[in-house]
Image (cartoon, rainbow, N blue to C red):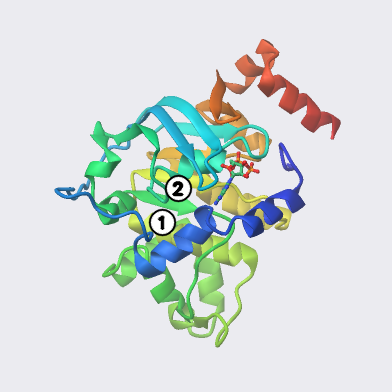
Amino acid sequence: VGVFFRPVEKINSVIETYPKGIAGFRRYTELLDTAPDIVDAPGARDVSGLTGEIRYEGVRFAYADGRPVLDGIDLHIRTGETVAFVGPSGAGKTTLCSLLPRFYEVAGGRITVDGIDIRDMTLASLRGQIGIVQQDVFLFGGTIRENIAYGRLGASEAEILEAARRARLDGVIEALPEGLDTVIGERGVKLSGGQKQRLAIARIFLKNPPILILDEATSALDTETERAIQESLRELSEGRTSLVIAHRLATIRDADRIVVVDHGRVVEQGRHGELLGRGGVYSRLASVQRAG
Ligand code: ATP
């Protein structure tokens, strides 16, 4: 299983060049709980227990330089559906997903969840309904228990252990002398890339949000670790509406729907076989990949 549309080096450089992407903003908002210029609207209400039906209606967006990045996105994502976003580098896939937790504000059109405009929800409650999995895992110096419990403060020991088990982190925890109370980070045990990912996944199992955004990892993990993580991600996405910024052919094939984004527009959508047969952008991307 390889990278579907582009080389690994490219991704890393994109993340470094744009620290304000999901990774940077996530870290920032986790610390401050809000982006500087995005605040609750007057009268915004707390939402909970959403089903996760998402609509993008004529969504437009540009970064500070004003160049249009999303140019009229219309999408209806059904409750529980897994949608894989694919397309050339710079097409707008990450941006499109970053608008849902309101890391950035739409410039035109609107996004609704369960029919409610996300700007009418409090930021904290909106973000409480979304789990984000990405390559750049946010961990803090503290115990494994604290790092998992960050997904839902006040969770019981049994719930933390269950989340760890579902993320296939239980074996790692058992092997550590102090188990859940092992300190990680600079002053403690260093976790491997795969272990960090599993910890991040455990956090989301605990949080149990109806919506998942998955910025699919392309970094090299050994095949066995990779497979274990893929399995727990598949389990994590069950019963949730999942938006995947997809790089893996396996993910793309398994998705309920593939949405092909190019130059800030949705240019094709459908299932893998259908899109290949259509001979459009998707089939060209796939054939370049095969040749590469
Ligand atoms: P990739 O597959 O390479 O990650 P993508 O399809 O996810 O690409 P985006 O990351 O959404 O595309 O980028 C869309 C466009 O917006 C690109 O032209 C990119 O250069 C630009 N862009 C992305 N993030 C920022 C930012 N924080 N500030 C300014 N421009 C940005």
**Circles 2 and 1: CB atoms closer than 8 Å:** yes
Tell me which corner region of the image, top left, top right, bottom left or bottom right, holds residue 53: top left
Q: Which residue is mark 1?
A: 204
In the rendered image, the residue lying farthest to the front is 65
Q: Nearer the viewer, mark 2 or mark 1?
A: 1
Q: In this rendering, is residue 50 above or below 22?
A: above
* Residue 28 placement (x, y as % from top left): 45, 65
* Residue 96 placement (x, y as % from top left): 48, 38
Q: Residue at x 54, y 63 (%)?
A: 137
Q: Nearer the viewer, residue 72 or 196?
A: 72
Q: Helix or strand or loop: what does disc 2 sit on?
A: helix
- State which quarter of the image contains the C terminus: top right
Does residue 282 show up? Answer: yes
As drawn, the label of residue 217 is none
- State which quarter of the image contains the N terminus: top right
Does residue 270 show up? Answer: no
Q: Residue at x 28, y 37 (%)?
A: 51
As drawn, the label of residue 236 is 2
In the rendered image, the residue lying farthest to the right is 291
Q: Amino acid at mark 1?
A: Ile
